[in-house]
Amino acid sequence: MAPQIDFLLPGNNLFIAAPSSVLQNDYISFFSKQITPIEFKENVFKGNKIINFFFRIFSIVCKYFQIYKAHKKKCFDLIIFNTINKPFHFIFIRSFFNNINKIHIIHNSDHYLSQKKFKSLYLFKKNLFISNNVYEYFIGRINNLADPFFFDWFLPTLSGIPLENNIPNVLLSSKINIVVPGSVHDYRRNYSGLFDALKSLAAQEFPFTVILLGKMSSEKQDEINSIGLGHVIKSFTNYIPGRDMLYYIKNADAVAFLIDPKIGDDFQLYNKYKASGSSILCLSFGTPCIVSDHFTVDRDLTEKAITYPGTHIECVFNDILSGKITKELLKKLKDIPLPYQYSHDYQKKHYRKLIGVE
């Protein structure tokens, strides 16, 4: 959402409809003086499943009505919806906003592969994917069944967000700095495989540091220290401010995705049906990536990718220990220019043109 706000400023009056937790997010709050919030109440109801289901439906209807009231007062020219997955949402959108120009941002394209489901996307002026790979894969899958005019893509690059941060220059060292963005949960990434790989190495002094850029429980951090990995893994038990996160990504030597078969079948969806957040970050800043050869790398990141077989990330660590992979090599990969279409300037113009606010 923050890149879209960045792309639309200046020159437009922006209203952001979201819960307070989203509005207070570092990336969004940076623009707080330039946007008008439509704040949703964060209702939490704990009851049996049936009552909870109807409560959630009622809560969703209230949110649509809240946006509708704001529209009646402000007369919106365009509404941008982020990821509509459930069919009943289309009913509400058609009921409340049928005569308003609408844009739909798609994160998971696998929801719309059937003829019945993708026809519901004609409700929108444009449906935009956040990955060129995912966009092309989707168009290839639906082939002649849908009008391609209603679909396109953009990169929500974060490179336009200022990088003022509150952290010391911990990355300015002789060691190779590898970062892993995202909350530290095994169902999201293969963290256990990472820990096992590091434990299997005999090195006493590692020429690299692995920085886990996500909030971790203190129990998990104690576990890392107890298995003797505290000197090679840097972790956080507190929330990492957004601009600190971007500083690490931009200045790291490499980003490790840790998306491989160990996380389950969902890993096969990445960069085919949905974009990886790590891919977007690497495309934003040109940082090299470390990925499993089972992972579908974005076409324009392949030259910047170091791959390992299956779940065996220890192969990369061994290549670092042997000197095959060096800080200098990673710098050369980082210096490989990405196509101009991934630049902030291009994406801002491209996005505005797609939604009709040139």
Image (spheres, rainbow, N blue to C red):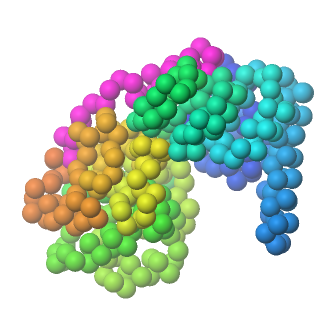
Residue segment shown in magenta: 330-358
Residue 211 in the image: x percent, y percent? 37, 62
- The one nearer the camera, 154 or 99, is 99
Q: Residue furthest top?
A: 358
Query: Which residue is rendered at x = 80% and y = 26% of the image?
Result: 98
Predominant secondary structure, magenta span = helix
243 within the magenta span: no
Query: Which residue is rendered at x = 32% and y = 44% of the image?
Result: 297
Query: Which residue is rendered at x = 52% and y = 22% of the image?
Result: 148
344 within the magenta span: yes
- The one nearer the camera, 236 or 317, is 317
Above/below status of 218 relative to 33: below
Residue 20 in the image: x percent, y percent? 74, 51
Say whether residue 327 is left or right of residue 212: left
* Residue 305 visible from this viewpoint: yes
* Residue 159 visible from this viewpoint: no
Q: Residue furthest bottom?
A: 226
- The one nearer the camera, 251 or 318, is 318
Q: How many marks?
A: 0
Query: Which residue is rendered at x = 84% and y = 22% of the image?
Result: 75
Above/below status of 57 relative to 297: below
- The one nearer the camera, 84 or 148, is 148
Residue 25 in the image: x percent, y percent? 64, 49
User: Which of the 4 image quadrants contains residue 15?
Assistant: top right
Q: Report the quarter where the N terminus lies.
A: top right
Residue 67 in the image: x percent, y percent? 83, 37
Q: Report the quarter where the C terminus lies.
A: top right
Above/below status of 275 relative to 341: below
